[in-house]
Image (cartoon, rainbow, N blue to C red):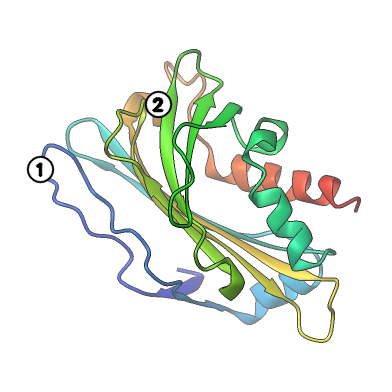
Amino acid sequence: MSFRLIFFLFSFNLFSEHPFLETFTSIPTITLNDDQKLKLENGDLVFWERSRDLSRKRYLREGIAIFRINAKPEIIWSIILDFSKYPDWAYKIWGADDYKSFIAHKRYVEFRTQIIGKKYYIEHDLSKIREGYLTWNIDHSRKSDCVLDTVGFWKVDQVKKYSNQCDVYYFGKVILSRLCAKGFLGIGGFNSRDMAEQTYRKFKEMTHQ
């Protein structure tokens, strides 16, 4: 592993009917090696992932993307929190709408994918944004397509000595149906690196870099 997440990353019962990933209650310590630090300082994307097949035609994938953006934290957060604009930049998303009232720092968003008719429901915890991060998890009270479970976080750190620069961290862990993860006969599917590169590219465009 090229970086360390000092945290108990996930837990779920492979024999239960539904897998449940452990929701983040705090952000793990993220340690980059010297090469990764240099890439970040030079404006390159830092990316890592791992994946494996699970029982009952399920597929686990987790990964992190880290990149530096020339913008203040409030600009970055305005992009992350404008869910209605996710179809403009988010990977394989063509629709996003609130499906439940905003309750106690929680934001509930239905995401519709480029696969016609497929959607999934995500609960976002915005209570720690002042501390520089938000977390999300799937809403198990609703039935999601393809995405059987997911947890993750956004983290935005202002670069020391540079008030107009931020390091952005996007970490996600997802359990997908194997067909949605890998596509049908090699067509479609979910590619974490493509998602990371698209996210970084779109963030630079949206901040006029």
Amino acid under label 2? Cys
**From the viewer's perspective, is residue 146 above or below residue 102?**
above
Circle 2 sits on which residue?
180
Mark 1 crowdedness (10 Å alpha carbons): few <14, some 14-19, many ≥20: few
Q: Nearer the viewer, residue 145 or 176?
A: 145
Q: Is residue 68 left or right of residue 25?
A: right
Q: Is residue 48 above or below residue 42?
A: above
Residue 153 percent across, percent down from the top left: 50, 59
State which quarter of the image contains the N terminus.
bottom left
Question: In this view of the protein, can residue 49 be seen by the observer?
Answer: no
Residue 141: image x %, image y %?
27, 36
Which residue: 46% across, 72% down? Answer: 27
Compared to 112, does 8 lie above or below? below
**Tag 1 or tag 2, which sits nearer the N-term?**
1
Per the model, the C-alpha gap separating discs 2 and 1 is 21 Å
> Circle 1 sits on which residue?
16
Give how far across and how far down residue 22 sits, in percent: 28, 58
Q: Secondary structure at mark 1?
A: loop
Residue type at mark 1 is Ser
Residue at x 43%, y 16% (from the top left corner): 185
